[in-house]
Structures are given as structure tokens and as C-alpha cells.
Image (cartoon, grey):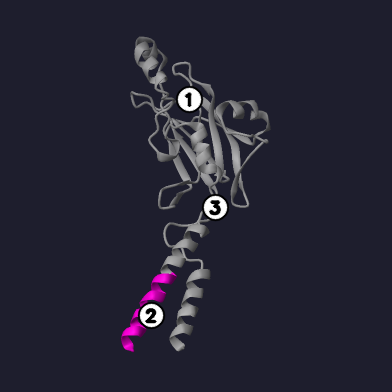
Amino acid sequence: MIAKVLIMIMSLVILFSPISVYGQEMNVDRPCSLSLSLIDDHHRNIQKGTFTLYQAAQYKEGTLVNNAHLKTLTKTSVRKAARSLPKMTKSVNDGKVVFRNLKSGIYYVSQSSHDQKYYPVKSFFVTMPESDEDHHYNYDILASPKVEETYQQENQPSKVKNETSKGKETTYKSKPTETKDVDQAVHEDADHKVKTQDTTRILSYVIMLGIALATMLILKRMK
């Protein structure tokens, strides 16, 4: 009888305790940051230009919600709703642009003005914070979009054409800004919840069952 009571108590503790079996929970109240590193093929820092950051979606009650009544998050839809979206603009400072104190969500990065020596950087989406497969979150994101000089593209038109036909828009060094289909990226985050309680609950059931079975085997052998 005592053994059964102990099993029930242990099961309830495991079931209702906020155990994080792996990874961590997203903290939507923690400020995020986005740093852009702008360096050309000759390893020279870009000195001119401005970038605008649009908040396309934000977290509400643990779920991503599009801003400005956007039905879908695509480059076209964000551009059309640009005036209604929260935004901020920063100037390039010795090859760097830093956006601080950002809320968690999906952002659209667009170059507002550029040095005439270079082509404008291709616009892209970024989700903040980023997470890996183990649900470890990174709140300070570094992106290195590709910067192309105009004369290089004029001298190598075939190369540029091939890259465009393959859908390569921007080359990045960090995970959150890897080039991929925008709609695919949005669908991956659309149903993303802030906390991983559902996964933890399932794993808790497995652990609870394992403890119960082990205890029963021990009691059986004792008899």
C-alpha cells in the first residue's frame, strides 16, 4: 500500500512540475538585437547607406500574430503594408548596423539607401529569437548579407544570371538569415508556441511510466 502511494506521489510531481527535459523556454520579454556586418569581397567595410527594419509579426499570448492585418508574410505583402508596420531605420557605421531592444517576432530587413559603388542588399526576413533543434534560443543575432560591387556584376553578367535563376538572393554566415523560401519560413513559425510545455508533458508521461514499471518490478522481486 505504501509503495502504491509513493508511486502516485512521484507521478504527480513529475506530471505537474515545470521540468525542462531539454532545451529551454522562450522568454518573449527579453530584448533581442540584430547586427548586420557589411563587408565587400575585398574585405572592406561599407561606409554609406541606411537599413530599415519592419516588424512583420509579434508574439501575443504565446503565438505569432501578423501585424497590420497581413494575411501572409511575403516580401510583396510587407512592402505594401510598410506604412502601417512598426519600423526603425539605422545608418551604416563602418560596415555595421545594429538594431537593439527589439521585441520577439518576425522582422523584414530592407536597405533604404546605398552607396552607388554597390548594389542594394537583397531584403530578407529574420525571426527573433532564433532557435536550434534542441530549443536553445539566441537573442542576439548576427547577419552578414552579401555585398556586391556594381562593376563586378557588369564584368560577370553570366555569373549573376545563374545565381538569380537558382533563387539565391543573399549569402549569410549566420543561421537565422539563411536564404530560404519566405512562405516556408513563415509557415514554420506560424504555429510556433513560446513554451515547450506540450513536449515536456509527453516526456513526463514516459518518465512516469518508466518509474512506475521499475517500482512494480522491484516490489514483485521482493515478494
Q: Residues within 10 Å of mark 2 (few under 14, many from 20)?
A: some
Task: Classify mark 3: helix, strand or loop.
Answer: loop
Counting labels gives 3
* Residue beneath disc 1: 122
Magenta stretch in the rendered image: 208-223
Q: Given the image, on which type of amino acid does mark 1 rest?
A: Lys
Q: CA distance from mark 3 to mark 2?
A: 37 Å
Is residue 98 visible from the viewing direction of this image?
no
The residue shown at (49%, 35%) is 184
Provide residue 170's location: percent of width, then percent of height: 43, 27
* Residue beneath disc 3: 194
* Residue beneath disc 2: 216
Decide which of tag 1 and tag 3 comes sooner along the chain: 1
> Quick check: 111 left or right of 163?
right
Residue 220 belongs to magenta span: yes
Q: Given the image, on which type of amino acid does mark 3 rest?
A: Val
What main secondary structure does the magenta stretch of the protein show? helix
Provide residue 22's location: percent of width, then percent of height: 41, 59
The residue shown at (46%, 67%) is 205
